[in-house]
Image: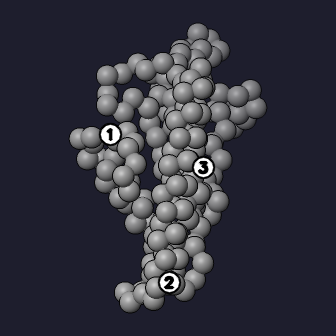
Amino acid sequence: MGIPYPVANNLPDLDSLFDQKIDQLIKKDFGSADSLSQPKVGQLLVSFHKNPSKIKKKSSWFGHVKDDIQQETTVWESWQINVNCRPVPPEKLSADTSSMHDRGVQQSRKSFEENLMAIYEKIDSSKDHIPPITTLDVSPFPYEIEVDPKSSKKPPPPPDDESWGNYIKKMLD
């Protein structure tokens, strides 16, 4: 498209994840798009997580100390991305259809560039919420990419095992 933007190079796992999610989006939301229909809309949710705490010491009655590795991560940023898929025109185009298609491509290019610039400005303006980087990994924060997040509901996290109510229930059992 001729629009420069930053890219993460030499990350085969990230590349394959993006390819997999794009394929999933195409099959799920855009599979029924034909050349005569209106643009189809899909949605992606990209969430970035803090690394889990290494060791959390919990003390209980009678001096018993339990080492607990905290597995749950906290989302510190999420991006909801709406994707519009323009229909592919047929091979043979009339002059009117061809000019409409060219205008659509130009509008898509302009929209992409405007949205990319809005993302850059937003990222540059608010960096205070980003947690400190504590590793030398290429990708220092765990991330997750969901296709159509409204349709995939996650179960709630299990209740904390060390609450007073659970402790009393254990004593009575």
Q: Nearer the viewer, residue 29 or 35?
A: 35
Q: CA distance from mark 1 to mark 3?
A: 20 Å
Q: Secondary structure at mark 3?
A: strand
Q: Is 148 located above or below residue 135 in the figure?
A: below
Residue under numbered circle 2? 97
Residue under numbered circle 3? 80
Q: Residue furthest top?
A: 63
Q: Quadrant of the N terminus?
A: bottom left
Residue 96 location (% of width, % of height): 51, 84
Residue 146 location (% of width, % of height): 52, 54
**Mark toward the start of the polypeptide (1 vs 3):** 1
Q: Residues within 10 Å of mark 2 (few under 14, many from 20)?
A: few
Residue found at x 76% / y 32%? 165
Q: Quadrant of the C terminus?
A: top right
Please state which amino acid type lies under the numbered disc 3. Answer: Gln
Residue under numbered circle 1? 8
Q: How many marks?
A: 3
Residue found at x 59% / y 67%? 41
Q: CA distance from mark 3 to mark 2?
A: 33 Å
